[in-house]
Image: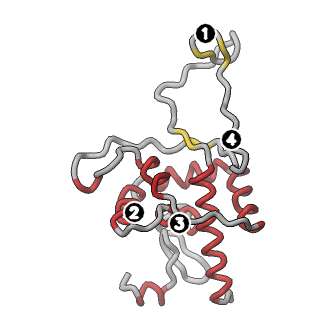
Amino acid sequence: MINRGAKETFFTLGLLALLGVGGCGILRPPPAAAPEPSAAGPAQAGGDKPLTRAAPAPACVAFDITLPSVAQAPAGPAHAGPKNLWVRIRGGLGLPEPDNARVESQLNWYARHPEYLNRAFARSEPFLHFIQQEVEARHMPSEIALLPVVESAFRPFAYSHGRAAGLWQFIPSTGRRFGL
């Protein structure tokens, strides 16, 4: 059984790993229409220079992931603010980034497994707009909206050996305490 201090440490580490993913990752929406590769050589912009990727910031880990497309949101209070959810999330990041070897280890794992993040972000589409809206309404840092990436990879029916369940992996006693 994991004691309370260890649980808090794991929670903090996971949350901070998400900070690094969201704050330092190079996150780009997918291109509108990717040209077919040709036998003539690499894709070129304007036909004269090969496209190159910008170098990441020195203190950041570069991620090569594709963010899920964000459908045009209906007008109304539920989707007020910037239309691009990822701009809103990045703008709301607010937790301090620690200098910790265990956090670095988790960040490196995410950097080596971008396909994991792509799958988690794809599964987040039905939930993330609403979660971010609620986080913003409560003036909480956006890292909270990304916590299900660590807890359940946005699998709504995730279940652990410790009986934690759902996106947030609440255990039964926590669910009862908060009326979930």
- Quick one: SS at disc 2? helix
Q: Position of residue 129 (x, y in %)?
A: 38, 55
Quadrant containing the C terminus in the rendered view: bottom left
Earlier residue among tags 2 and 3: 2
Q: Amino acid at mark 4?
A: Pro
Q: Position of residue 133 (x, y in %)?
A: 35, 60
Q: Is residue 110 or residue 165 the one in the foreground?
A: 110
Q: Residue at x 66, y 33 (%)?
A: 54
Residue 47 shows which numbered tag? 1
Q: Is residue 24 or residue 27 the one in the foreground?
A: 24
Residue 80 shows which numbered tag? none
Residue hosting label 3: 147
Residue 56 shows which numbered tag? 4
Location of residue 151 (image quadrant): bottom right
Q: Residue at x 23, y 55 (%)?
A: 77
3D distance between C-alphas at marks 2 and 1: 43 Å
- Quick one: SS at disc 1? loop
Residue hosting label 2: 131
Earlier residue among tags 3 and 4: 4
Quadrant containing the N terminus in the rendered view: bottom right
